[in-house]
Image (cartoon, rainbow, N blue to C red):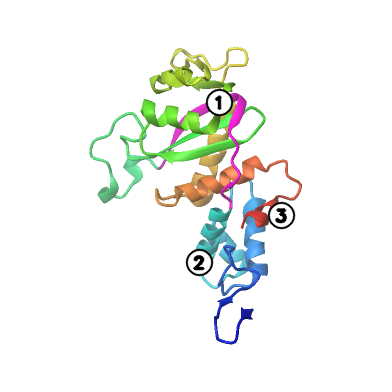
Amino acid sequence: MKCGPKPRSPYRFALTTGTIFEESKKPLIMWFKVLHLMVTSKKGISALQIHRMLGTGSYQTAWYMCMRLRAGMKDPEFRQLMGIVEVDETFVGGLNKNRHWKDRQKHQGTGGVASGKMTVVGAIARKGNVVCKMVERTDTDALTGFVREVTKAHATLVITDEFRAYDAISIYNRKHQFVRHSAGEYVRGNIHTQSIESFWSLLKRGVIGTYHHVSKKYLPLYLNEFQFRFNNRKEADIFGKAIAGC
């Protein structure tokens, strides 16, 4: 639609203007089918499988559509977590020995960063939502900064493992408890990190079993997708919720 006597003057717009569907050559019904497959697949669905099922024209087109939809799944109304919140970090990436020789790390350590893997830190409220992000470091500043960003002060019990980088959490008005995995302790009453570890398991099964490989550049978009599905797991109309964010 145009408003004015001259082409594109003063402004041209359509129902898709300002959405991820703007100026797409693919019909909306195709976008909706792709989105529905993505949000109803517990561990995700690959672009190649979508291309085979829907006939998107090429694998590259299906991949592009999936990436645009993942960008639209980012939660614009994030609310800080409160109550009992579990925090943990994990490492995403293949074994060094399985990589091409040009991509292998010459000097490996025991941590994910040293072995060339991507580091993801996450927090989950018990029986609530999860939030996670990729980080470059796992030092005190990075991890406590994440906790301060995603949890509400004075109203949160933060539970972690015994990693020393979490020791400063209590300084920032958050109660802090931890379990000693190195000593074989995984549960002490209601002190455990099983909820966030279950989410990590879901994420890794999706990455390994569905996508096989996720690059550092696009990992944040895949995290958007897994967070969205998990946080809307009880939503009757998860497809409609996803459309509203696009």
Q: Residue at x 39, y 31 (%)?
A: 142
Residue 75 at what x, y percent from top left?
A: 59, 46
Q: Which residues are magenta?
A: 73-93
Q: Is residue 163 one of those drawn in magenta?
A: no
Q: Residue furthest left?
A: 106
Q: Mark 3 — residue? A: 240
User: Relative to 80, does residue 176 appear above or below in the rendering?
Assistant: above
Q: Earlier in the sequence, mark 3 or mark 1?
A: 1
Q: Is residue 105 left or right of residue 202?
A: left
Residue 12 sits in which quadrant?
A: bottom right
Residue 243: name its quadrant. bottom right
Tag 1–tag 2 contact (CB < 8 Å): no
Residue 202 screen position, x and y as percent = 57, 39
Would residue 10 be visible to someone looking at this image?
Answer: yes
The residue sitting at 34% across, 35% down in the picture is: 113
Q: Residues within 10 Å of mark 2 (few under 14, many from 20)?
A: some
- Label 2 and label 3: CA atoms lie apart by 26 Å
Instruction: Identify which amino acid the numbered label 1 is placed on.
Output: Glu
Q: Is residue 68 above or below residue 131?
A: below
Badge nearest the viewer, 1 or 2:
1
Q: Report the quarter where the C terminus lies.
A: bottom right
Query: Callout 3, which amino acid?
Result: Gly
| Helix, strand or loop at mark 2 | helix
Location of mark 1 (residue)? 86
Residue that label 2 marks: 59
- Neighbourhood count class around disc 3 (C-alpha, 10 Å): few under 14, some 14–19, many 20 upward: few
**Residue 177 at what x, y percent from top left?**
52, 15
Q: Position of residue 16 (x, y in %)?
A: 62, 68
Report how far apart the C-alphas of labels 3 and 1 lie in the structure.
Answer: 29 Å
